[in-house]
Image: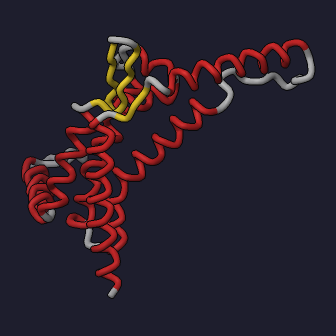
Amino acid sequence: MDKPTSLGVPSNTETHSHLARIISAAAELDGPSKFAIICVFFAWFFIDTLVVSVGSMKHGVRFFDAAAVIADPTRMFFSIDTSFGVVVFALLCSLCLIAPLAPHLWRNRLAWLAYLLPLILIIVCGLLLYSRTSGDILATPSDASGLRGSVMSFANKILQRGSDLVARHVAVGAGGYVALLGSLVLGYQGMRRFLNKRS
C-alpha cells in the first residue's frame, strides 16, 4: 500500500527545524540589539506615545493605536476601540520588531537593512499624523469660489485655530522617546553591519 502523500502541511520535524532556526537567529543578535528590541516592544505596546492633557484629565495613546489616530486624529482624545485596523497595525509593529532576525536567517547583505524597519515605521507614522493634523480638516469642494467653498474655507480656518489650541495639550510621552532611541540603536547596528559586509 502506498504511503499517503503530504498536502503541504508542515510536519512536526519541519516545524521544530524552523523554530530552532528562529531561536538560533535570536541568539545571534548582539546585546545592544536585543535590549533595543525589548525597549521598542514595551514602548510600542505598554507605554504612552502621546499624552493628551486637558485640565486635570490626562489620556495616553500607545503607538500600536497610531493607525486609528492617523485615520481620525480626534480619536487621540477618546479611548480607542480594538478594531480590525488596530489589530492589523499591531501585527505590522510585531513584524517590524522581529525584522532584525532577517540577516541571521538569510545570509544576504541587504537583509541587514531590516534593522531599519522600526525606525522607518515611526518616521512614516509621525509624518502621516503631522500631515493629517496640519492640513485642511474639511475637504474643500471643487467649486471653491461658490458659497459652499467659502463656508468650508471659513470652517477650516476655525478648526485650524482649534487644532493649534489642541496641539498645546498634546505632548510626546515616554513611549515615544524610548521607541525612538531603541529604533535608532537598531538602525545604527544594522547600518554598521551592512557597511562592514561591503568591505
In percent of the image, x 30 and y 73: which residue is there?
192
Question: Residue 32: x, y in percent?
Answer: 16, 61
- In this image, 117 relative to 128: left or right? left
- In this image, 60 relative to 11: left or right? right
Q: Work out whether residue 2 can be spotted.
A: no
Q: Which of 53 and 199 lies nearest the eye of the viewer?
A: 53
Question: Residue 40: x, y in percent?
Answer: 24, 45
Q: Which corner quadrant of the image does residue 105 belong to?
A: bottom left
Question: Residue 50: x, y in percent?
Answer: 37, 30
Q: Work out whether residue 144 can be spotted.
A: yes
Q: Which of 195 and 82 lies nearest the eye of the viewer?
A: 195
Quadrant assignment for the C terminus: bottom left
Q: Where 7 sits versus 25, above or below?
A: above
In percent of the image, x 51 and y 21: which residue is there?
166
Q: Where 23 sits versus 189, above or below?
A: above
Q: Which of 19 and 27 lies nearest the eye of the viewer?
A: 27
Q: Which corner quadrant of the image does residue 62 belong to?
A: top left
- In this image, 3 relative to 82: left or right? left
- In this image, 33 relative to 149: left or right? left
Question: Residue 96: x, y in percent?
Answer: 32, 48
In percent of the image, x 40 and y 31: which residue is there?
171
Q: Which corner quadrant of the image does residue 197 belong to?
A: bottom left
